[in-house]
Image (cartoon, helix red, strand yellow):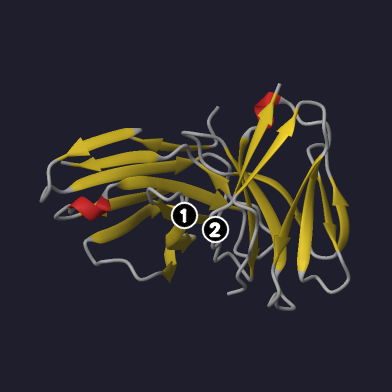
């Protein structure tokens, strides 16, 4: 069974559209995250949720809105997509918030804006 | 957040031991040192984590000197499937900051 699963794996859409990426983890973890990996392969954290509550919100345009219906799910909704949003988006989870809690990543959603 | 510096790329041959060193001169007291591995088209995968001295698991060893300003990931007897990008992270709490990583190429 996949521990952290993201859908869709690929997403190609037009500029200006609104799209969502879903993430689910079956590890029983309390904390979930969204990361963005750009073309230079740098991975940057966007959001972190603990038990459905937002705990980290890095400098991300407010077009990006995470939603956590329960602690096993953290979805990412993006409004008015722009060319610069093209990237790979990774979801991750960890048992808790501590520095010694390894994060488990999904395989990414490749978003391409036309 | 502590910044890390690691080589951009390394080449090795199957069966060799590979050591990747990461510098983190301004590491803080609370920081752990964590290494992740990333294959193409996959998310990063946790390899090993340590705070001081030496940590070993079934995949790798992590050596941390007393001043903790650097650390070395050691991969014993690499195989072709170890070709990947390896990231060194030094972070308090769960605010992971990934640098560019080291691209390891294992050749036959």
Please indicate whether residue A41 sits to the left or right of residue A81 in the image.
Answer: right
Q: Secondary structure at mark 2?
A: loop
Residue shown at the point (38%, 48%) measured from the top left: A39
Q: Please determine whether, in this image, residue A84 is positioned above or below residue A88.
A: below
Residue shown at the point (62%, 54%) measured from the top left: A95
**Residue under mark 2: which chain is it in?**
B
Which residue has dot 2 on it?
B98
Q: Are marks 2 and 1 in contact (CB under 8 Å)?
A: yes
Residue shown at the point (49%, 60%) measured from the top left: A51
Q: Secondary structure at mark 1?
A: loop
Measured from the top left, where is residue A107 in percent x and y?
47, 37
Decide: few, some or many residues near mark 1? Use Cα within 10 Å; few <14, some 14-19, many ≥20.
Answer: some
Q: Quadrant of residue B88?
A: bottom right
Residue shown at the point (83%, 43%) measured from the top left: B57
Please state, as top left, top right, bottom left or bottom right, where the N terminus of chain B lies in the image.
Answer: bottom right
Q: Say the numbered circle drawn on residue A42.
A: 1
Q: CA distance from mark 2 to mark 1?
A: 6 Å
Measured from the top left, where is residue A25 in percent x and y?
50, 42
Q: Please determine whether, in this image, residue A8 is positioned above or below residue A28.
A: above
Q: Nearer the viewer, residue B48 or B87?
A: B87
């Amino acid at each position: 069974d996949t521990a952290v699963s993201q859908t869709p794996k690929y997403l190609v859409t037009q500029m200006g559209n609104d799209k969502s990426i879903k993430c689910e983890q079956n590890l029983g973890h309390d904390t979930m995250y969204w990361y963005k990996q750009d073309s230079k392969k740098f991975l940057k954290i966007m959001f972190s949720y603990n038990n459905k509550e937002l705990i980290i919100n890095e400098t991300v345009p407010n077009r990006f809105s995470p939603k956590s219906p329960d602690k096993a799910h953290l979805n990412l909704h993006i409004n008015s997509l722009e060319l610069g949003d093209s990237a790979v988006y990774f979801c991750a989870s960890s048992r808790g918030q501590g520095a010694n809690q390894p994060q488990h990543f999904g395989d990414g959603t490749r978003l391409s804006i036309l | 957040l502590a910044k890390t510096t690691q080589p951009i790329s390394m080449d090795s041959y199957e069966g060799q031991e590979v050591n990747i060193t990461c510098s983190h001169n301004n590491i803080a007291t609370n920081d752990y040192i964590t290494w992740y591995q990333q294959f193409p088209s996959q998310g990063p995968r946790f390899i090993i984590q340590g705070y001081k001295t030496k940590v070993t698991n079934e995949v790798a060893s992590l050596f941390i000197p007393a001043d903790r300003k650097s650390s070395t990931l050691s991969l014993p007897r690499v195989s072709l499937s170890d070709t990947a990008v390896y990231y060194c992270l030094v972070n308090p709490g769960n605010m992971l900051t990934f640098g560019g990583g080291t691209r390891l190429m294992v050749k036959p």
